[in-house]
Image (cartoon, helix red, strand yellow):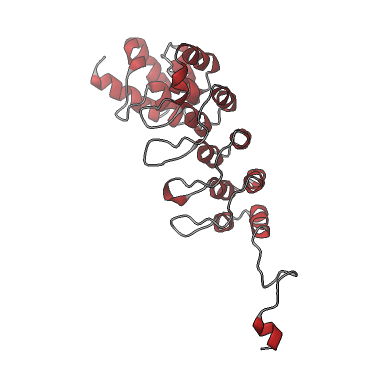
Amino acid sequence: MTTDAAVALFQAISSNNLEGVRLLITAEPRLLTAVSPSGLSPVLFATYYGRPEIMQWLIEAGAPLSVFEAAASGQLPALRAQLEDYPALVNATSPDGFSPLGLAALFGREEIAAELLARGAEVNRPSENALRVQPLHSAAAGNHSALALRLLAAGADVNVPQHGGFTPLMSAAQNGNAELVEALLAAGADSAAISEDGRDAAALAQEEGHTAVLAILRATQHDPEESPNALPTPARETGA
């Protein structure tokens, strides 16, 4: 396997050139085990770049699937085979810092997430990189509602911030996902939490024009001045 061929392969994947990938792999099958400068296999690289056709072709061409490739690409039989042989891999860390559950959440692989949770995956484990995202952060950011609800049922922390101070509720609000916003609030999410740039979930919903979500969030914020049960202030008592 030559360095130039590997570079060409990852360039073909990033540019969504399926025919180029076919030609390169056919000429040099060992490229299926190539590694990108960031440490990703061709299958993971194609998954990150949102190239499902290339990802599937690579798998069918015989690309080896570690627990990380299996989790990210949604290959349940391959995942089970890995975990049957090496159960500790359920909480392993990928070259770019994600657990198998983190990858499943990132790419919306609900069936994979269910399998990992059943095998003891740590639901609140953050990524070991600068993002510090937990699986719930990734599911909320990706708008993967069903998977996010499954993580909540497994005990995911609704208020832990990721890099930048973003919480799952902020991501759900920014996406306009009313169902998930309501579920997160019901699970104890703090609607008053502020990101490092000074925005809360309501501000993010308002910026994106998600009026239904904004109404839900505002309903959780109580103004004692307007509450019918609020005690009178001294100014009210004196008529000042």
At 61% from the left and 37% from the top, the residue drawn is 152
Q: From this view, report whether residue 179 is shown above or below residue 112.
A: below
Image quarter of the C terminus: bottom right
Residue, far right: 228
Horizontally, residue 65 falls left or right of residue 27, namely: right
Image quarter of the N terminus: top left
Q: Position of residue 51 (x, y in %)?
A: 47, 27
Q: From this view, report whether residue 117 is shown above or below residue 22.
A: below
How many numbered marks are there?
0
Q: Position of residue 159 (x, y in %)?
A: 54, 47
Horizontally, residue 193 falls left or right of residue 95, namely: right
At 52% from the left and 18% from the top, the residue drawn is 75
Nearer to me, 121 or 213: 121
Nearer to me, 101 or 229: 229
At 32% from the left and 30% from the top, the residue drawn is 38
At 44% from the left and 37% from the top, the residue drawn is 126
Residue, far left: 3
Q: Quadrant of residue 5?
A: top left
Q: Position of residue 128 (x, y in %)?
A: 38, 35
Q: From this view, report whether residue 26 is shown above or below residue 147.
A: above
Q: Position of residue 79 (x, y in %)?
A: 50, 17
